[in-house]
Amino acid sequence: MHVVKSYLVDSWIAGQEPTTPLFDAYTGKVMAITSSKGLDLRAALAHARDVGGPALRAMTFTQRGELIKKLSEVVHASRDELCELAGKNSGNTRSDAKFDVDGGSGTLAYYASLGKKLGDKTHVLDGAADPILRSARFVGQHVYLPRHGVAIHINAFNFPAWGLCEKLAAAFLAGMPVLVKPATATCLVTARIVEKWVEAGILPAGTLQLLCGSAGDLLDHVGPQDVVSFTGSGETGRMIRGHAAVLRWNVRVGVEADSLNAAVLGPDVEVGSETFQMFVNETSKDITQKAGQKCTAIRRIVVPTALADEAIAALADRLSQAVLGNPDERATTVSPLATESQQADAWRRIEDLALVATRVAGDPDEVPETGFFVGPSLFRVEGGAAAPFVHDHEIFGPVATVIPYDGSAAEAVAIVARGRGSLVTSVYTDDTTWAKDVLFGIAPHNGRVQWGSKKVHDQGAGPGTVLPQFVHGGPGAAGGGEELGGERGLAFYWQRTAIQGDRALLERIGLV
Ligand code: NAP
């Protein structure tokens, strides 16, 4: 049996019994086992702080960018092998696996080029120097420098490649060493990438460590210079935020959690128009891509009452074309969920939804004989912002709910806002006045907003695709975190300090 080891203090090490099995999501067979029991996580964090941090901080942004470029190239070169592994351990179709793996190498490549742009320096100035009182000589300058701790990345199961790479890219470029803990159930892809990087000999000692298996006592050992970036359920996020050592040292915590994302169709959109097709394409794609196990997936489809029947008919037509089956086969368009417990959880929540909403397309129970599948389905619920269940519960599977509304910008905003904070909302309209009211109204409730209209109807990758140049994260229920966004994503790993002194002397050391 393949034992997935952790990579701590620059060595591969297996945890003790009891171990956790990792499954093939289609056949249900055990693929490997892992454990973190008995691993010395205090020593691992100390190694990152003592060895990895100084190594990265000694490098300029250009040099860190060159390192990140090499990491990206290794992932890209291993693409086929990684996609095959994701097809098994995550149950991904080839296209879903590429979404994860290429998203990872692409994000690394983006941050590599940002390193080149930031150049041959190790710090970044924030704004210009300001005079202290009336003196032109005695000034203060804000500067960003990497924290002297370790960046702990606790990741969700659904993007084992992208989740690893997107957080690592920003942390490394900012100058912080990383300890990554992937979700246990799908850690094979993350572990294989780290293995490839170690084999390639490109990681300076202590800069990257991998913990497979449960988090154990990891958080007991965090310190004042550390940061924790967490992606997963809101419940785990709250536990991490409330951890005693995290509170004791005011450890900076970023949380990316559950999100009830929405798509809003404007009342001006004609059925069959380019804007309507864009709405149908993007909404139906989000129900089935990665079997709906995407944090950015559209869960609430907000359509004017007058267009609801036609919108549902168009979406039902798309769902009827879904092919569930062996992820290895090209014809398969919808993969199984990653684990049996997620399948059970999705079915249970769908039952709850069915108590208050009407199923209008698909059947969650119509699934192949093997694999942790949930059939794609569409529901309809009345009541707008007061509708039960849909604004409070995320079903992490191929399910979405149509919520009819009166077509006014005010009601559209109220419905989106009722999600209490989302990662992304898409709006489809060619009416600029209506669009302004909706976009400005929903923006504070979202990390990202996409406006779909006829001029861009055939462009972009859809609202569910997270691009490195734009921020990822959302307020409230979405966790309150913010990642990526180009250089913005580095600030999480930096301390901003105001340095006050003689302007000429500050200038001599690059601080003005
Ligand atoms: P989860 O159960 O909260 O697990 C997330 C991570 O936290 C895993 O690595 C897990 O490790 C770890 N963890 C669990 N308990 C912990 C503890 N006490 N201390 C430290 N770490 C702990 O979530 P999930 O089931 O993997 O992911 C599904 C959820 O993530 C969905 O709700 C989805 O919306 C959300 N998500 C959000 C985003 C986003 O960017 N906003 C992206 C993807 C997913 P083990 O696996 O070892 O338990």
Image: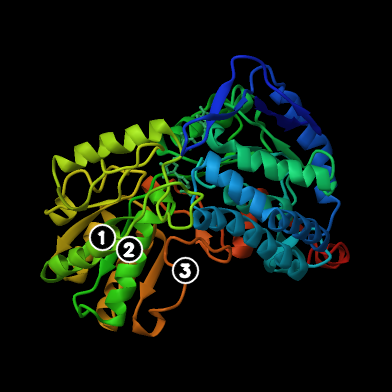
Q: CA distance from mark 1 to mark 3?
A: 18 Å
Please tell me how crowded label 2 is: few (under 14), some (14-19), or many (20+) other residues with Cα within 10 Å: many
Name the residue: 23% across, 47% down.
Answer: 363
Name the residue: 59% across, 37% down.
Answer: 187
The residue under label 2 is: 283
Instruction: Give the colour scheme of this rendering.
Output: rainbow
| Displayed quadrant of residue 266 | bottom left
**Is the CB of the residue bearing disc 3 within 8 angstroms of ligand 1?**
no
Q: How many numbered tags mark residues here?
A: 3
Please tell me how crowded label 3 is: few (under 14), some (14-19), or many (20+) other residues with Cα within 10 Å: few
Residue 328 vs 184, above or below: the answer is below
Q: Is residue 9 visible?
A: no
Q: Position of residue 293 (x, y in %)?
A: 42, 47
**Callout 1, which amino acid?**
Ile
Q: Earlier in the sequence, mark 1 or mark 2?
A: 2
Q: Nearer the viewer, residue 26 or 287?
A: 26
* SS assignment at label 3: loop
The residue under label 1 is: 301
- Callout 1–callout 3 Cβ contact below 8 Å: no
Q: Earlier in the sequence, mark 1 or mark 3?
A: 1
**Callout 3, which amino acid?**
Ala
